[in-house]
Amino acid sequence: MKKCFLILMSLVTLVYRTTAQDYLPKWKEGYMDIHTVATGRGDATFIVMPDGTTLLIDAGDNGKLKDPQHPDTTRRAGEWLAVYMKKVMEDLPDKENIDYALITHFHDDHMGCVRQMLSGPNGYGLSGITLVGEYVGIGKLLDRAYPKYDFPSKKKVYNANKGFMPEYHKFVEYKVSQGMKIDKFNVGALNQISLQNNPSKYRKNFEIRNLAANGEVWTGKGEKAEKQYSGDPKLFDENVNSCAISITYGDFKYYNGGDLSGGNWPIYKSQERDMETPVAKVCGKVNVMKANHHGYYDTCNGFFLNMLSPDVVIIDARSNNHPVSSTMARMTDPLVWPDQGEFYITVDKAREKLSDELWQFFKPWGHIVVRVYEGGKEYQMFVLDPDRVDYPVKYKSEIKTVE
Ligand SMILES: [Zn+2]
């Protein structure tokens, strides 16, 4: 009888553990979680730092019906993103407000757009970041061009996201009147985005470096930045102006550079569009990298891959060109980059174009969570089901030691 009871109890424990492991275990102080949220309509990365400080990098909604949307189309991408963030924030000290939002550049798939825009109660349209702002408070907003929005020219900034920039300006004006702070992203700065809850505890092992924006790159010395462009606006598009950052926690390092270019796009041959090479020189080795520009033609050049040598590559995807075959082939070619990492992707739209040969490199797709454990010595990858709002785990890796 006693034996039967013990077997029953171990079965109960096993069932309990299996069930408990179906969801991402709760965040706790000391963990850094990096969520790449799979809306299917644009980029969004929500980061919870070790003391609970929060940062949202981009809140895209390109509004294109041909691109998949997860979990479904009953709400706009910005609202689904907010639903996800709210779920994460259940474990945090502040459940209503995030500390920072960073818009890497002014393209629709990073900030929202007029297509499918909802009308809002405060005089501006709701899409992407302006829609997220309806559900969570934002402590400080950073973008590449505040307050003049004139680099490389006012017209270029306006044309980067026609019709939506005036809505964004009205959103900024309204939110600032309600107490939100806003700053221009300062290239080269150390900890312009900083821990808000317990900075002294992590002073020695946590930092955020602003690597690049507006064609300028950190020099690697102090907080100085250097221009990488001649000043000819014809050589530039909005992507090249993207804000790039690295986050270091203990031995762990993460890179996110929006849609920065690596200069190898056949239609734009200018080497001035290669921001990856100077960024790679000052960034160095990382453990986890969000591939620039969704893994499109112009990104992830060989030098960049070698220098960053990521153990994990994340593709924040929405179209069947994310990533393109040539970039995927380069990323998975051991002759280009000897230390092959693991590959993660948010949506499966590129599966057919890539064919099984290249698609097989990816882990199951969905919301991608990097959980960095206390002190930044170990981390683990989780993929959560993007078609359910209880976000069960689709895949999880072994715990990896940071080398
Ligand atoms: Zn993009």
Image (cartoon, rainbow, N blue to C red):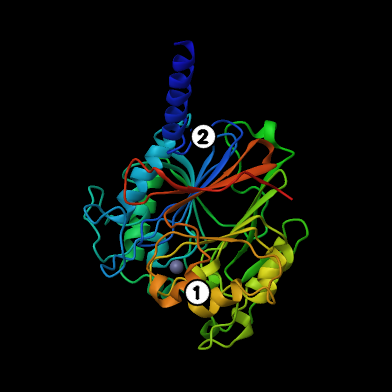
> Which residue is at a point 42% across and 54% down the rendered structure image?
366
Does residue 87 appear in this view? yes
- Up-down: is 209 above or below 14? below
- Up-down: is 395 above or below 13? below
**Disc 1 on helix, strand or loop?**
helix
The dot on residue 234 is none
Q: Which residue of the protein is positioned furthest toward the right in this rendering? A: 221
Nearest to the observer: residue 324 or residue 17: 17
Percent x, y for residue 238?
A: 48, 73
The reply to whether the residue tagged 1 has its Cβ within 8 angstroms of ligand 1 is no
Residue 211: name its quadrant. Answer: bottom right
Does residue 227 appear in this view? no
The dot on residue 27 is 2
Residue type for callout 1: Glu
Instruction: Give the mark count.
Output: 2
Percent x, y for residue 176?
A: 41, 46
**Disc 2 on helix, strand or loop?**
loop
Percent x, y for residue 190?
A: 68, 51
Viewport quadrant of the N terminus: top left
Nearest to the observer: residue 353 or residue 58: 353
Which sits earlier in the primary sequence, circle 2 or circle 1?
Answer: 2
Q: Are marks 2 and 1 in contact (CB under 8 Å)?
A: no
Nearest to the observer: residue 91 or residue 12: 12
Nearest to the observer: residue 397 or residue 220: 397
Name the mark nearer the viewer: 2 or 1. Answer: 1
At label 2, counting other C-alpha atoms closer than 10 Å, the crowd grade (few under 14, some 14-19, many 20 or more) is some
